[in-house]
Amino acid sequence: MTIDTRLKNRWVYAFGDGVADGDASMKNLLGGKGANLAEMSSLGLPVPPGFTITTEACNHYYKKAKSYPPELRAEVAAALAIVEKRVGKGFGSRDNPLLVSVRSGARASMPGMMDTVLNLGLNDVTVEGLARLADDRRFAFDSYRRFIQMYSNVVLGLDHHMFEEILDDRKDALNVSVDTALTAEDWQGVVRDYKAAVERALGHGFPQDPQDQLWGAIGAVFESWMNERAKFYRRMHDIPEAWGTAVNIQSMVFGNMGETSATGVAFTRNPATGEARLYGEFLVNAQGEDVVAGIRTPQSLTRAAREEMGDTAPSMEEAMPEAFHEFVHAVGRLEHHYRDMQDIEFTVERGRLYLLQTRSGKRTARAALKIAVDLAGEGVISKEEAIMRVEPTSLDQLLHPTIDPSATRDVIAAGLPASPGAATGRIVFTAEAAVRESAGKEPVILIRHETSPEDIRGMDAARGIVTARGGMTSHAAVVARGMGRPCVSGAGEIEIDVAAGEMRTRGRVWKAGDIITIDGSKGEVIAGAVPMVEPELSGDFAQLMTWADQHRRLHVRANAETAVDARTALQFGAEGIGLVRTEHMFFDADRIAAVREMILADDEAGRKAALAKLLPMQRGDFVDLMTIMEGFPIAFRLLDPPLHEFLPHTEEDLAAVARATGLDAAKLLRRAGELAETNPMLGHRGCRLGISYPEIYEMQVRAIIEAACDVAASGKVGPRPEIMHPLVAKAEEMAFLRALTDRVAKEVMVERGVTIDYSVGAMIELPRAAICAGELAAHAAFFSFGTNDLTQTTFGISRDDSGRFLNAYIDNGIFEKDPFISIDVEGVGALVRMGAERARARRPDVKLGICGEHGGDPASIAFCEEVGLDYVSCSAYRVPIARLAAAQAALARKS
Ligand code: PEP
Ligand code: MG
């Protein structure tokens, strides 16, 4: 909304007595706290009168050599006069003193990062006035000493320990242990000592003029915008420095005026579970900081909560029923007004309720889901709003067992949160040990320097995986996410000694067999077993997903190779498979021998003989996938990695393979040497294998079409296989691969007498393929953007080695996010956009998808929606995230 012209160019906005200059829409100018105080005041809720100095004034302060705008003093004086009138007290008055709080309040909440001063306006004279007004000397001097301590710390820069020591010494001298045992005279003595300490430390007395106090506090709040804590918090939460903080100056109300006074914090719903019940705590006869400091145990708000907790101290409902009922009514109004769960601070002063703050409450993923669905069910928000209220990636927390949030964690190493979820098991250091131990049903955690495709069975057997090296798209991370195994990658502080069967981290030694827990959502390795909570896929989750599906345009498929992956994908709502990495099927123990035989063959005949052994195995796998995904499309990506990945690497391994298979050890060694490449990522891989050894792709195409014939013959809905060629760059390559595919498919269909509705396409993983997508489209019915390789080849950054230096790029702000996780819209995205446009121009009905890791990242999915791709494909466990993100992207484009 536009600001009333009367209010334009003002630095100060007042609120209180049922009116306000600002409102909730003015968060940018007034900060979250200031805007909501204004809004609550206009709603007629009991808010202590006050005023807000704008974030613009803070920006002025920093831009103009830490000086205030010239008009500010007069505007503050005028606003203070209004507050005095509203409250009926005078700032600095000896008989009827107005005290104020001075608090920060940025546009986004930054809890505890900036400074606050309470009880401002007290001095040696006004403290007597307060004592008379309150008819309570003890309260007045307790308030004064709190003020001296807070102000001296926040504004004068003195260490608060100095004051705590003075207080402790006095308590010792009086032989008491709690503050409540101190009398008015005792507090008066503490005030004397505090003031003397300030004088000693600074060479001048504690400021007595309330105006000096006020401007000192305003300056301190502006200064606190740039303190180290605040800067760090802003970096962590992407809050721009240019936002600045507002300053809220508000008349004080006291929760520490005896047994009919109290202070507390409440959430309108449970922020951990989302349950629609008032949740929170309060303290009788206390000031706000006492709740935060945790010195006294707070009491429940409601009687029900007290009974559940088994507390003996009375709840607010029981101790102050009138204030409680007024409070319940007020928070109900606030939730309804803001149409979201609120986090509210309040004070009761001698039985009278005041609201000091309201904001949308932070919540767990579980609570976010329940609150969104419940609010839509209650008619407070629309279903579309409910969809927009849940952060898609937070669903991760719900799809895997996770560590009980109340559990204590003894973290022994930290790495990247490569694959979410948590798992507990015994340490193993080799894939073989993982398979062996887990066969005895012993849960294990596989710890490796890095994983290679050979480890796949061990990874599958393990409950979780930890690697000391590798980034978010390292082999371990991609495979673990695909399998839904929790994984921590790049935990560089772990030193592994496989031979000794032990690892060292943070000065401790862990042996094979020791129990650890990993948290793949946080990237932590934890000592021992830690309690877990199981995922919940029905109820609110299912409801929100159904609503999301009604709004999304993008289809969502999964990347899956195994029957287990495919079933999981279906259960999570996948509408097909966007990527079957067919080589994953070659790593099974009973297949790898035939694969190695094929690689070692001297000639085409030898290769064909070995491939003939692999054919029935691949066909069997494909039949399984087509049967499970009945009727849904499946994109089978033909062999992609360089062949040497299938050969054993060390001499010992070579000897072991030779013994087990009867293959010639010397030949094996020679061949491994021949196949070694300087830069395998840019080497003999992808469709280059199919062009130099066409018999490999012929076998794979045959396996796919034969499987489709078998499935069609079994009466299942006709499978629609998509045969996808990796790493294509040239139209001539595509023409060659297309001819090969059609020839073999035709052969099989003629042999079987069945027609299969198959299609041939390519992955776009090279800049040239994106640029020349029009020419490629002459021979391809579909394209899938392989953005893992496309990112690698566009930046020229190896996806396997990026972990070593990308952090420095992110820390220095060169990359905002890891481009292997969230698509680089300007570069890689431009190629995707160009590829899509050029492919469509040549072939309007071309089908377009994405199957790199970006297919499960909400920001990248929004980009795919904008470019108009037909589908995204991601690991099975990210399918619900992609469904929600796709719905949000579609809704965002409509609005
Ligand atoms: C890709 O490159 O984006 C892709 C999906 O293929 P892979 O990760 O198997 O190289
Ligand atoms: Mg690739």
Image (tube, rainbow, N blue to C red):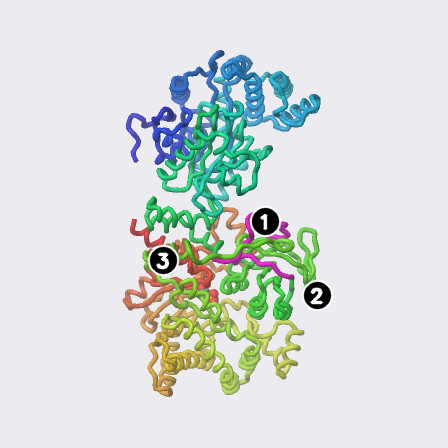
Name the amino acid type tagged 3: Thr
> What's drawn in magenta, residue-wise?
399-426
Q: Which mark is residue 499?
A: 2
Q: With respect to residue 340, does 545 lie above or below? A: below
Q: Which residue is mark 1?
A: 407
N-terminal label among 1 and 2: 1
In which quadrant of the rendered view does residue 381 lie? top left
Q: Are marks 3 and 2 in contact (CB under 8 Å)?
A: no
Image point (47%, 79%), residue name: 620
User: Foreground mark, 1 or 2?
Assistant: 1
Label 2 secondary element: loop
Residue 185 location, x and y as percent?
Answer: 62, 16
Q: Give the residue type at disc 1.
A: Ala
Q: Amino acid at mark 2?
A: Ala
Residue 784: % across, % down: 39, 66
* Foreground disc of the pair 3, 2: 3
* Element on which disc 3 rests: helix
Report the Cα–Cα distance between label 3 and label 2.
52 Å
